[in-house]
Image: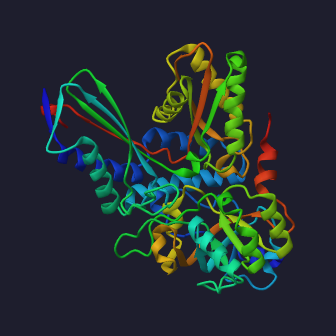
Amino acid sequence: MQEISASLIAENVARLCQEANFDLPSDVRDALQDAADSEESTHGKRILGEICENACIAQQERIPLCQDTGMVLVFVEIGQDVHVTGGSLTEAINAGVAKGYQEGYLRKSVVADPIRRKNTGDNTPAVIYYDIVPGDHLRITVMPKGFGSENCTALGMLKPADGLDGVKRFILDAVDKAGPNPCPPVTVGVGIGGTADKALLLAKRALLRDVKSANQDPDIAAMEKELLEAINKLGYGPGGLGGRITALAVHIETYPTHIAGLPVAVCLNCHAARHKTWEWRGEKVE
Amino acid sequence: MSKELQQENRGSLNSGSGEQCGIRMNGDQELIPVQLPFAEGLTKGLRVGQRLLLNGVIYGARDAAHQRLIEALEKGEDLPVDLRGQVIYYVGPTPPRPGRPCGAAGPTTSSRMDRYTPQLLEYGVRALIGKGRRSLEVIDAIKKHGAVYLAATGGAGALIGRCIKEMQVVAYPDLGPEAIYRITVENLPVTVAIDSRGENLYETGPAQYRRI
């Protein structure tokens, strides 16, 4: 068994919040640079140039990539042989978010109540998902999620008879409806199967995959490729002002489902596809 | 905008500031410098797709500030800031680091402001800066009032923040990032997305590339 203090977790969450908002992952940067090289439209090419320059400035000057520094999603994978000491794990994560957003000069975008809408002032609470796994390690991924793209989320409870064609049409329609609003070029996360909530979580988690990765199932991988090509024929392009590159990637995840259902969820990420992971393995800590 | 003015004012955008990152921001597009507030009638001459460099004062306001402005207008009260003839920028900036005027300050999604915009154009706001589509009601109001909708690059908050030289809260401080900000900009690059004839780059741009 390994022990980890709540304060060490809080400190690392604070760091992850800042790094995620300042440093665009290298796979995303490379994909945007490739897109800038291949985009045909004048506005599109110029916008991709601005996006790449923006990433460079954010990294060098420690200014957020985007003023919408998001509501924080935290994915926690915790070994069942890890013992958290000195406080609650959830409280430690939220303390880390508050500290990171204060010290990093990040925007506080969370309201305490969706109806009365008073700002909590420290960007807490985060939305946290826990997975208990075998082992004695801890892995925390922070994903600041902006709401320009979050507001474009789509959920379809399709019928089994809608089949593969229905699923593809639903995904393409979701990206078409979103159009310029989620800050293209987007990453498209798709969850198929499970229950409604499970499909949405799969879609959200799919946004964490490496841009160039493909699903291990060759049929699903083919579907990802086909959908990416179709999405890039919609014409929205960078910034939605017209162009070839509307999406950088389509990532699909699946799960067993019920005989009566075919849930499909689509989550979009803007071009600032931010996330940062910390892995802790006790004494072997980096 | 006269052809002469366009020729005369080929701008070099942000000269110096982005060089260490090694990418030219402007591409090959011509830039037309504009001093704010817009001279009477100038917004009517702007055409979709034109690139402008804005200089002067704009007002940052988003969802909650819009709601309050409209409530005041509906009650017949004076607005806390005189926005007639002015430019509204849909933005909620990040707090600046000490010694800096501004943090990240890119545009937010404009369509959330659609329900308020016709009344603000009627009141006298001249131009709107944001990102993404507008409703038919907003486009009609833009035509009716000879206004203009300008697109800034979404998600380029750090880059756009560099064009901001001064920023202060001038109304509704209790709204935090949703307060109204008076923002002084220097060479803020924007694209005419909907002009006073109702031409809409968010329709015509993608239509050129749609193959499905």
x and y, in percent, of residue A32 in the image: 55, 44
Identify which residue, A136 or A275, lies in the foreground: A136
Q: Is residue B54 visible?
A: no
Residue beneath the point at 74% across and 58% down:
B134
Identify which residue, B93 or A125, lies in the foreground: A125
x and y, in percent, of residue B8 in the image: 74, 78
- Using residue B181 as the reference point, say whether residue A98 is left or right of it: left
Quadrant of the image containing the C terminus of chain B: top right
Residue beneath the point at 45% across and 58% down:
A111
Q: Is residue B32 above or below residue B38?
A: above
Q: How is the image coloured?
A: rainbow
Identify which residue, A206 or A3, lies in the foreground: A3
Residue beneath the point at 32% across and 62% down:
A102
Quarter of the image for residue B99 reads bottom left
Q: Is residue B53 above or below residue A112?
A: below
Quarter of the image for residue B94 reads bottom left
x and y, in percent, of residue A269 in the image: 54, 42
* Labels in figure, total: 0
Q: Is residue A278 visible?
A: yes
- Using residue A28 as the reference point, say whether residue A280 is left or right of it: left
- Using residue A191 as the reference point, say whether residue B7 is left or right of it: right
Identify which residue, A71 or B192, lies in the foreground: A71
x and y, in percent, of residue A117 in the image: 49, 61
Quadrant of the image containing the N terminus of chain B: bottom right
